Image (cartoon, rainbow, N blue to C red):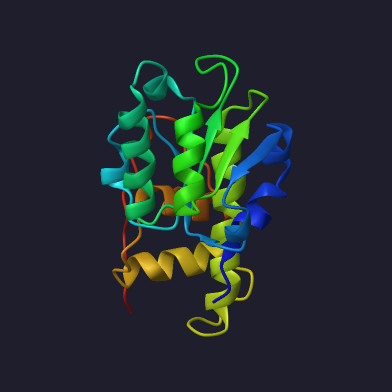
């Protein structure tokens, strides 16, 4: 199944609105992106499974020393992150040179985001595109659901597919289902 690449993620409107500047990893723009999410948790690399584009506003990097910043980039690369996008200008006036240097050394795509765009907009657009690409790739191989995203999602849930919460939410949104904040959902499977 064809994956969404970093290059394709960069072409999405909310990402372009953030005015991304590529600082490192130019040769890795065709790297597949499995998911996009944000984290200000400095030890965020521990929560990655590989293939993620991580968005951060840089709060964790502002008071960190040079070696700590380098280790942060090394840990992201070691966990298989697809790339790192850092908002510069507010919490972090500019990209620390040691972050750029380490990302260059490891060929980890590093982006400076020069305009504030809520990360939820970037993640939502990218993750919807990732899920849509995945569904279009799986549709012909797994299920004959056509464009019925709801039926495909319900079938995967009923079959016990390993889906994480953000994937379920993104796929539900593609199907037109948008439960409100704090909604409690109950799944029911009928047979016969």
Given residues 38 and 167, the one toward you in this image is 38
Residue 100: image x %, image y %? 51, 37
> Would residue 8 appear left or right of 59 to someone viewing this image?
right
Does residue 68 appear to the left or right of 81 in the view shown? left
Left or right of 64 on screen, residue 11: right
Rendered residue at 58%/23% (across/down): 88
Residue 41 shows up from this direction: no
Query: What residue is drawn where x is 44% and y is 52%?
Result: 106
Quarter of the image where the C terminus is located = bottom left
Residue shown at 31% from the left, 45% from the top? 75
Residue 114 in the image: x percent, y percent?
66, 26
Q: Position of residue 135 (x, y in %)?
A: 55, 69
Q: Locate residue 46: give its quadrant.
A: top left
Q: Is residue 114 above or below residue 153?
A: above
What x and y, as percent, mark residue 110?
54, 42
Pick the residue in front: 135 or 58: 58
* Count of numbered labels shown in the rendering: 0
The residue sitting at 35% across, 64% down in the picture is 157
Q: Within the image, what quadrant is residue 13 found in?
A: top right
């Amino acid at each position: 199944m064809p994956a969404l690449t970093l290059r394709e993620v960069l072409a999405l409107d909310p990402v372009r609105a953030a005015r991304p500047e590529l600082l490192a990893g130019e040769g890795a723009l065709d790297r597949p992106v499995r998911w996009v999410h944000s984290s200000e948790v400095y030890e965020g690399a521990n929560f990655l499974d590989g293939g993620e584009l991580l968005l951060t506003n840089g709060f964790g990097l502002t008071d960190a020393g040079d070696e700590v910043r380098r280790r942060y980039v090394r840990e992201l690369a070691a966990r298989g992150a697809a790339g790192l996008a850092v908002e510069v200008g507010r919490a972090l006036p500019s990209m620390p040179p040691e972050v750029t240097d380490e990302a260059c050394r490891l060929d980890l795509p590093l982006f400076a985001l020069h305009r504030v765009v809520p990360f939820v907009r970037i993640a939502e657009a990218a993750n919807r595109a990732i899920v849509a690409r995945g569904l279009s790739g799986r549709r012909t191989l797994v299920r004959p659901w056509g464009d019925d995203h709801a039926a495909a999602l319900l079938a995967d849930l009923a079959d016990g597919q390993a889906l994480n919460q953000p994937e379920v939410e993104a796929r539900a949104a593609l199907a037109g289902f948008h439960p409100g904040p704090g909604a409690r959902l109950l799944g029911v499977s009928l047979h016969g």
